Amino acid sequence: MQRYFVKEYHGEQFEISGEDYHHITRVMRFKENDQLLCSTLDGKTAICTIAEITDETVIANVVKWVEETSELPVAVTIASGLPKGDKLEMVIQKGTELGASMFIPFTAARSIVKWDDKKSAKKVERWQKIAKEAAEQSHRSRIPTVESPISFPLLIQASKSYDYKLIAYEEDAKHGEASVLANVFQQMQEGQSLLVVFGPEGGLTSTEVSQLKENGFQSCGLGPRILRTETAPLYVLSAISYHLELMR
């Protein structure tokens, strides 16, 4: 059943407009009495029947509110050093499918991309749209938040609110570190939060890693292979799902 995240709802009725209206009427070609899933931005989901299609709005009536457990049991934030090209878009899309709750791009010392504040609003809007569409496709109950890129000092400041903090550090992988990630997973309890920092192409500098460790981060390897900046977050999210969902 097709899912849509809808801002406008009143009691037992949803009002769908904009791009979702176009998708329902032009792409899916839904008609009155067809059913779909409508999710609110705070995580509630209902099976709905289309009651009316106007020139700009689809009106959907709630048939039944449903209980869902599609979210990871812990809140995982992916902090990515700004990479080149569309790599971050891939991280957001696939990371959303794998259960991430937030994405924080940051400017690292080795980030080749220079963030243009003049284009920031449009860029972040595109990233948030990618997250929304991926959340709908993967039947998430919530849309992850995609933050505007921040500086490295602001990332450290933002990290203070997390229960657990990790650095995916390739130097640890080279030296065979294999216990930190598993130990953190074993300690985490449902409802807790985890922030994982990934460097851009070229990785994090030793100075950045030292500063993160001084602020409560643990560095960890992700197996014996060196992963690309767009692959490493997907590895961690998959490992979290395996450990906290499939193994429990």
Image (spheres, rainbow, N blue to C red):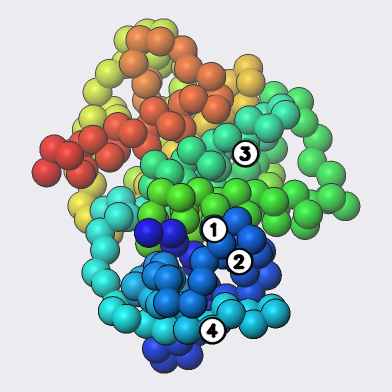
Query: Which sits earlier in the primary sequence, circle 3 or circle 1?
Result: 1
> In terms of secondary structure, where does tag 4 sit?
strand
Q: How many marks?
A: 4
Residue 152 in the image: above or below residue 183: below
Q: Amino acid at mark 3?
A: Glu
Q: Earlier in the sequence, mark 4 or mark 1?
A: 1
Label annotation for residue 89: 3
Identify the residue at image location x=59%, y=80%.
Answer: 53
How many neighbours does mark 4 have within 10 angstroms: few (below 14), some (14-19), or many (20 or more)? some
Labels 3 and 4: the sequence-earlier one: 4
Picture quadrant of residue 67? bottom left
Looking at the image, can residue 38 be seen? yes
Tell me the mark number nearer the camera, choosing from 3 and 1: 1
Q: Which amino acid type corresponds to the residue marked 2 in the rendered image?
A: Thr
Whether residue 216 is visible, yes or no, is no
Q: Nearer the viewer, mark 3 or mark 4?
A: 4
Residue 234, given in percent of the width and then of the height, sits at 43, 32
Residue 52 is labelled as: 4
Quadrant where the C terminus sits is top left
Crowdedness near tag 1: few (<14), some (14–19) or many (≥20) residues, C-alpha within 10 Å: few
Point 17% across, 39% down: residue: 246
